Every structure is written in C-alpha cells, then in structure tokens.
Image (spheres, rainbow, N blue to C red):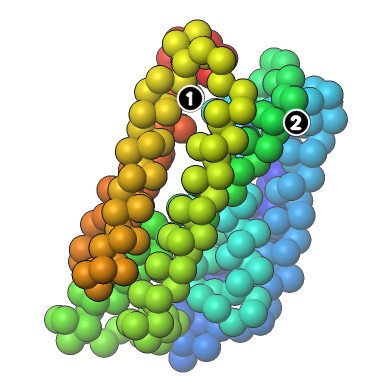
Amino acid sequence: MTIVLIAAVLYVAAAALLWHSATGDGTPRRGWIPLAVLAVLFHAETHAEAWRLLQGADMHFFAALSLVGLGMTALTTAFGASGRMPALGIVVFPLAAASLLAYRGYGHADNASELGWRLQLHAWMALLAYATLALSAVLAIFLWAQERALRRREFRRWLRALPPLTELESLLFRSITVGFVLLSATLLTGLLFVDDLLAQHLVHKTVLSVLSWLAFGALLLGRWQRGWRGAIAVRWTLAAMALLVLAFFGSKFVLELVLHRTG
C-alpha cells in the first residue's frame, strides 16, 4: 500500500506544481518532471508486483483502468518534459492517481489471465490506443475551453500555459492520427484470437469499438477534405471517445462487476 500512496502523492504534487505555473506566469517549472517520473515508475511497479504474485497478467476492470492511466501519464511526462503541452498533467496526473488508488482499494483479480502472444499483442495495443485517444479527449477539452475563453475575451492566467490555438489544434489531430492507427492495429490483432464473439462476450465491445473507429476515421477525413476544426473537432473527438470507453470499460464493468464474469 505504501508504494501506491507515494505514487498518488507524487502525481498530485506534480499536478499542483503545473497548476501553480499555469496560474502564475504560465511558465512550467521543471520541478514537476522528477516527481512525475517517480510516480510513473512506482505506478508501473505496483502492476509488476501484482503480476508476479499472480504469475500472469491482471486485466480486471480496475487494473485495466489503472494501466490506461499509467499509459496516459507516461506519454504526458515524456512529451511534457520535452516542452510539448506539459499542462496536460494538471488533468492527467490526478486521474492516474485516482485510478491507481481505485485499483489498490478494490483489490486485484483472483487469478491471472492466461495470455498467448497474440492476445498479449492485442491487449497492449488496446491499452496504448486507449491511452493515446484519452489524451486526445483531454486536448479536445482544452481546445474547447481555450476557444470559449478567447471568444468571450476572458484572458485568464491559465491560458498562458497552453500553446496558441492553431498549435493546440494541430497537436490534437496528430494525437488522434496516432491513436487511430493504434486502434486500427487493435481491431486487426483482435481478429487473430477471436473464435466466437458470443461465447467470449465480445459482440457489444466489438460493435462499439468499430463505431468509435469509424467516428475517429470520419473526423480525420473531414479534417483532410473539409478542414474541420474547432467545435466540430471537439464534438467528434468526445463522441468517438465516449463510444470507445463504453466499448471497453462499459463491457468490462457489466461483465466483471455486475454479472461477475470474466470478459
């Protein structure tokens, strides 16, 4: 439990430093980086320890939620340390802390998932895709907040922590493109091991995942052909991400926490 609490405190401390910078002169202080790196390492060690005890992968609902949070913080730390959008940590780090505490509080799976190499490839692709696209959703919210503040001429201090509107929009679509490629790979690798959609309780998950993939694809196509941006991009991003959350975590919640089955 100690390592979990330390990681959570480090996440919150890193987010607090970033928030202080955002509401001050808008210049991120580098002190948040070592805190975030340590938090990510402790977060990862929590899962590694659980997997060692179970002698296999723990992919229970809260474990998967925490792993996505870990992926989001790792990406945020890596890109933020290079000076690209460190303000993401203000939102991402507390979310990761909450997911880690939920994972620790509600315990681990009773037994490990037996994953062959194909299923492992699919699972890691999925987690990375969800983490990347979840960051896209956070960027979309930032874009919406920035546009709204500028439109109302509310020049608040936190705006200094964000890049210019066009740069933020460009970053959003780059992250969506990467996430879309990863999601495509996830669906493709899923074909390698799915034998029976009904028996494996994958019908709803597959349908919603494909709908999300189509929504993200339509957004990228609209951006390329019609120059979609602003509010349209935000709405499509959040709608597509909502479908993806329902596809994975919605189905896992019902199967594992309501019906007490393995999804």
The residue that mark 2 highlights is 117
Residue 176's quadrant in the figure? bottom left
Q: Considering the numbered disc 2 on the image, is that residue within a helix, a strand or a loop?
A: helix
Q: Which residue is mark 1?
A: 252
Closer to the chain start, of discs 2 and 1, is: 2
Query: Which disc is residue 131 wearing?
Result: none
Point out the residue furthest to the bottom here: 25
Q: Amino acid at mark 1?
A: Lys
Q: Are marks 2 and 1 in contact (CB under 8 Å)?
A: no
Q: Residues within 10 Å of mark 2 (few under 14, many from 20)?
A: few
Residue 196, compared with residue 169, is above or below; it is above
Disc 2 from disc 1: Cα separation: 21 Å
Give coordinates of residue 223: x percent, y percent.
29, 67
What residue is at 25 percent from the left and 73 percent from the top?
Answer: 227
Q: Position of residue 74 (x, y in %)?
A: 65, 59
Q: Nearer the viewer, residue 224 or 108?
A: 224
Kind of residue at badge 2: Trp
Q: Is residue 55 visible?
A: yes
Residue name at image x 51 percent, y 53 percent = 181
Describe the element under mark 1 as helix, strand or loop: helix
Residue at the image point whose x is 62% and y is 23% from the top: 193
**Which residue corresponds to the image point at 69% horizontal and 15% vertical from the top-left?**
110
Residue farthest toward the left in the current orientation of the protein: 152
Name the image quarter holding the N terminus. top right
- Residue nearest the observer in this picture, 245 or 225: 225
Which of the 4 image quarters holds residue 78? bottom right
For residue 3, say whether it is visible. Answer: no
